Image (cartoon, helix red, strand yellow):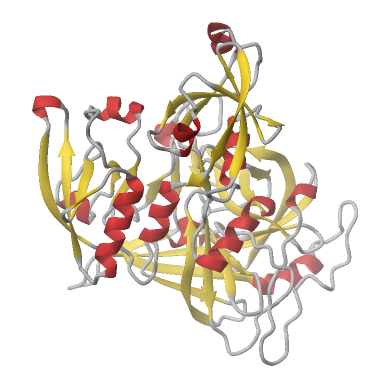
Amino acid sequence: MKRFTVVAALAAGVIGVWQLAPMVSGAITPPVDQHISTLIGAPASFADVIEAVQPAVVNISVTGPATAQTRGHIPMQPGTPGPDNFEDFLRRFFERQSFNAQGASPSFQGMGSGFIIDADGYVVTNNHVIEHASEIQVTLGDGTRLDAELIGADPKTDLALLKVDSDTPLPYARFGDSNATRVGDWVVAIGNPFGLGGSASTGIVSARGRDIQSGPFDDFLQIDAPINRGNSGGPLFDLSGRIIGINTAIFSPNGGNVGIGFAIPSELASSVIDQLRTSGRVERGWLGVSIQQINEELAKGLGFDGDTGALVASVVPKSPAAKAGLKPGDVIVGIDGADVSQLKELTRRVADVKPNEVVVLTIWRNGERKTLDVSVGESPTDVAEARRGEPESKPRLGVTLGELTPESRRQFRVDDDVEGALVTSVTPGGPAAARGLRPGDVIVMVGQLPVRNLEETANAIQTATSDGRDSVVIRVVRGEGAGSMARFVVIPFA
């Protein structure tokens, strides 16, 4: 079978929503696009556009400790576009090199792209560009190198926001309306491919709304403008010099550009960047259900009289959905009066709801349609990710945690009476791996405090770091029935 690869072109890329520069002392640098006349049709040259916007594009370099995640390539989420399921070959490749100076711990260096979104020095990039980095530097178009602070990151949309301090206002780019972008429109990509810096390429929008299964909010613009390793996080401009996307990944059989690139649309990223800038984290609504797309076969088997909707496969105990009376086997056909035809429609609509707000779900159950009022909660995984990423504490254990669901209990053979947070993955070479943790373990106590779910576990770990401790004691349960075992483990914070 032919092996394909999704390659993330290293660079930064998030989309912002600010159209005006904040007031700063001294002269204010105008937005870089203000002198560009809107072009219609195929231009004779892209030079005016590129010359105008290029000062807002930056190169990003990162360094950090070498781990399995930073050597060569990093696995993406399972799944890939294409006719076959070859998720084992789905990888994100980085323009990174590992080194081991004499007497020093193994380290890595990496390069990517980004862009300035206001004169005060806020910079957007991809999360995967700065992930695992201990030091981040931004190089401006004139060669000036500035240390960057990570304001916040959102792995689910692969966006990150940095901040640099400059003695003078910085040139910045403004965000356009990706919703107005049509298939066939010209686009210009600028970034740092292979560390060359300041490279531009052009092409068209090939498709909209692409789902490459890299996360729950995939809605990519597909472009044929050449992008390569090092372009990740770089901006995608329209011909008026507005940013309509962030170059994030390419689909390739050989690791190089073949004319299939993907950019996060500005419309999707704007609210994420706004929240990162305000609070350093993203707050999302949460129902607490596992869902699957209804199809003709399922509809026939259930006696469902429709052909679209989200079938509830499981409900998390004590979740907002459980409290509202949602049950496995229900089909969610509407939310706040809008039809649910695709799973991602429901996922995005719920994520956009602020916690504690009420949504009205229209469901089909046993041949009848009814409505349920659900007070939406906050996604526990977002709480955990935000707290692991707080710059003042950085309580990193080298594990990814999730909620216990009926499916995960069956998969990892966890007894029904066990409560806590499920270890879903362990970072090779990380603190948790060194102490023997593995996927399927359940954290049931932090210190001497029992924990019943992911949120309580995240809170307890955060408390340990806030108290100034350099490690945390957890009690872990593994296995089921008479063959289960429990033990206390001390894990240092990385």
Nearest the eye: 389 or 287: 287
Q: Is residue 257 visible?
A: no
Identity of the residue drawn at 61% across and 31% down: 361
Nearest the eye: 429 or 266: 266
Image quadrant where residue 197 sits: bottom right
Q: Is residue 413 above or below residue 193?
A: above
Q: Is residue 123 above or below residue 329?
A: below
Residue 483 location (% of width, % of height): 9, 27
Q: Is residue 297 above or below residue 98?
A: above
Q: Is residue 271 left or right of residue 330?
A: right
Q: Count the numbered circles shown.
A: 0
Residue 104 location (% of width, % of height): 21, 72
Residue 335 location (% of width, % of height): 64, 34
Image quadrant where residue 411 sits: top left
Residue 65 location (% of width, % of height): 29, 64
Query: Which part of the image, by quadrant, shows the N terminus?
Result: top left
Q: Is residue 323 left or right of residue 296?
A: left
Q: Is residue 397 above or below residue 133?
A: above
Identity of the residue drawn at 33% across and 68% down: 393
Query: Which part of the image, by quadrant, shows the C terminus?
Result: bottom left
